[in-house]
Amino acid sequence: MDFLSILTTSVTSAIGPVAAIYALAIIGLNMHFGYTGLLNFGQVGFMLVGAYGVAISVGTYGLPLSVGVGAGILSGIVLALLMGIPTLRLRADYLAIATIAAAEGLRFVYRAPFARDVTGGVFGRQNLSDGFRELNPFPPGRYGIGDITFSSSHLWTMLVTWALVLIGSLIMWSLMHSPWGRVIKGIREDEDAVRSLGKNVFAYKLQSLVVGGVFGAMAGVMITLHQASVTPDQFRPQVTFYLWAMLLLGGAGRTLGPIIGSVVMWFLLTFTDETMRALDQMGLLPFVSGGQLGAVRHALVGLILVLLIIYRPQGVVGDRREMLVNVK
Amino acid sequence: MSRRLVTVLLAVIAAILVIPGYAAADDQGGETLSGQISDPGSSDGGVEGIDITVTDDAGDEIGTATTDTEGAWEVDLPEPGTYTVVLDEDTIPDDLEGYEIAPGAEQEKSVREGQDQVTLFRFIEPEEPAGDSEDSDQDEDELAEEEEAAEEGAEAPDVDESAPFSHQVAQVATNGLVYGLVIAIASVGLSLIFGTTRMINFAHGDMVTFGALMAMLFSTGAGGLGNSILGLLVAVALAIGIGLVLRNRVPPGVRLAVQSGLLVLGIVGATLVGIFGGEATEWRVSLLGNPGLGSQALDIAAIVLVPVAVAAAALAAGRLLRGRVSPDLVLPLQGVVLLVGLAAGVWLGAVGAALIAVVLGAALAAGMERYIWQPLRLRNVVMIQLFIVSIGVALLLRHVLLVLFGGSRMSYPEYQVQDMVGLGPIALAPRSLGIMAIAVLVLVAVACMLQFTRVGKAMRAVSDNRDLAESSGIDVARITLYVWTLGGGLSALGGILAGVHQIVHWQMGFHLLLLMFAAVILGGLGTAYGAMVGGIAIGMVAMMSTLWFPHQLMQAWALAIMIIMLLVRPQGLLGRRERIG
């Protein structure tokens, strides 16, 4: 078993483009759950509409990339409004069910055969990121330190996505230190108290849902640019659950929570994955074999979620008091 | 503390970044074409010895590969570009001659820089068992899509397009009723659990899958694993029974010793059976799930009659013995009656499997309540965190089941092919009639239980208002445990019925979960009767929508109904205004 190569693979995935994309989506989820206390179990839906904003504009209608990015973000806003207006007046658990259902319903619609002319059905859309790769300032080749290397296109995606994550975190930090942020946090702590101060709680919640949704949509846009292709089935509800696990691992309600959560979780996941694969090749895993390792990984995410809530609900950098707030 | 943790972590990452790598960098720049050809007859076997040839644009051969024991093949490419992959049909093993290859034996693939492009060949049965007449001229894409749709759990209702529209409506409505009854059975537990604990149990769908897979395990005899679980169960049951008998008769130390001895024996035995039992399951298959033993009518009758008879016998034994033998013998004797009844159920084949699965489902739910939810509630963990834990439990349960049972789609062997029974314009498979009968009987039984028995009334009281129920002297913790047990049993039964109706698949429960959410919101969160009404309505809506809209959208329509309901009447059909906050 080559321990060093397992470590380098894990670090590569922990700082790679996918971790950055997840961090971006988690910033949105942190806005919803960490700061406002909204139970959004359908963040993957925002990613889906964001990704397809690009896929449909560029792939189906041949529009320039900038239009696609704009369309993706706009779809995120529209989805937030559609999802929020019926459910935000109700108790938190209704939002939880409605969001998970809306995200899954969207996936069914995007993959349905009658939508194939527009979305590409189950096969999705390909060749989407030519415009993005033309902007790549790095000449082709591999870059990195030691064994941790990325191809030039991955490096470019990483640069853009981590920059977005950084900007997003700064925006979140300044938002949360503004009067608007105090109202938002107040809603999480005690909705009725905020209402008695004459604030329109519904409007604030809707604004929070929109802001977080835009970050989800941006993550979707970056998925499309990273992969250059997109299919509906990569937006299964499990993605949302991964995002939740990462947010809770990092610490909900904290600016750095999403980044730390995504990096640490991807490191852990790849590390266990690679270790199991190595053990499997040495014949030391009697009960599982090649194809089942992916399932073990999902089970592991579930286990991490349960153990986190039981033993360290505040995550790595969180504040325990922030997680003790109950949402009505 | 947390800052230190972050510092250490960053330091580790930095250290790793600085350490110069001495391990040879592997050359990941190359492009490859690869794939895996799986055996259509088994869940995880591959087809060995098929030749694959790759040619480039100019028609020059780039390379060939032969699939290995797992059906995998790989061809390295010199550069990015467009290549043609051809499967040599002469090398297909003889036993697969009857199959067609999707999407065709020749495929064109464009490979980009550094990409490992996967090329899929699948063996599919030339004719769909459902017998759609238009299948022959379906193109491959549509076929792939049908499969995809089926994987989503959406079953295209078989409707004769040439029949008059009213007949089609009748047929589809009946299919919807069957589907709706299955959803209703499964969602009663979800709604009751929500009512008593205010928790949305995201793991409910996977409890449904658990029931279906357990029934599969015990009805088909999946080698040593089934025997092991059965052995363990017998050991646990014996330990509990002995404990009851010995209570107050011997010193507690002796009782504990005997009990743990039995458990250890059970575990050792189960492990031995698991290791050495292997595929030699002749004796067990004849004991459990012998398809020849019961005709379908007998099966259905037994599914209904055996539990009723067993419960009645246990109750009657209790009545008879009360006052005649010492009171602490009554319970063990009732237990013996129950065990004998269960054994009879086991003997009845698939029915026994279903019974065991329902009991296991109830036990799983009760165990979760006792060892996860109750301790968490006692620690004053807030609601949101319980939701998240339930998601974690769902992921865990689902993927453990996936590891144990594999990802293939299965169906209960007894119910695969059935001749349709015609009832006027409606044609139904006998299994659908059975599902309807069982579902209606069970729903009525549950309703009677909730309406007329003390426990049922207590359940409704706790579900209505937990604090009020507690202050009026109801043991809320005990009732919650009963609600979970009932919900678990019903979800397992729902899974078995869904499995008989369509397929058994490791994700079936999750797909049903969304429909169950729609059902309980439509009927009113927290009300058992609402879940029944909502379930039937959602099933009907889902099926009826296929008359006008593509069947892939069945589930989307059900979810749309749910959202509309939230807009118009958020408390649901039978819910009350105060619940919605």
Image (tube, rainbow, N blue to C red):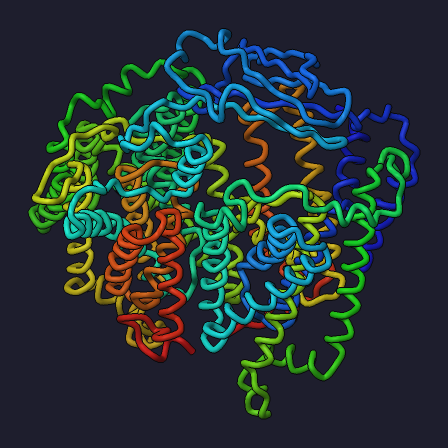
Q: Which residue is drawn at the image coordinates 18% and 59% (left, top)?
A: B449
Q: Quadrant of residue B41?
A: top left
Q: Quadrant of residue A247?
A: bottom right
Asked if residue B72 lies left or right of residue A228, the reply is: left
* Residue A315: image location, x then y, percent: 68, 58
Q: Nearer the viewer, residue B138 or A188?
A: B138
Q: Is residue B563 visible?
A: yes
Q: Which residue is drawn at the image coordinates 40% and 66% (left, top)?
A: B563
Asked if residue B553 lies left or right of residue B497, the reply is: right
Q: Please say if B300 is above or below A67.
A: above
Asked if residue B577 lies left or right of residue A92, the reply is: left
* Residue B420: image location, x then y, percent: 15, 34
Q: Please say if A119 is above or below B25.
A: below
Q: Which residue is drawn at the image coordinates 34% and 55% (left, top)?
A: B484
Asked if residue B22 lies left or right of residue A68, the reply is: right
Q: Quadrant of residue A228?
A: top right
* Residue A168: image location, x then y, percent: 75, 64
Q: Is residue B381 visible?
A: no
Quadrant into which the N terminus of chain A falls: top right
* Residue A33: image location, x then y, percent: 60, 67
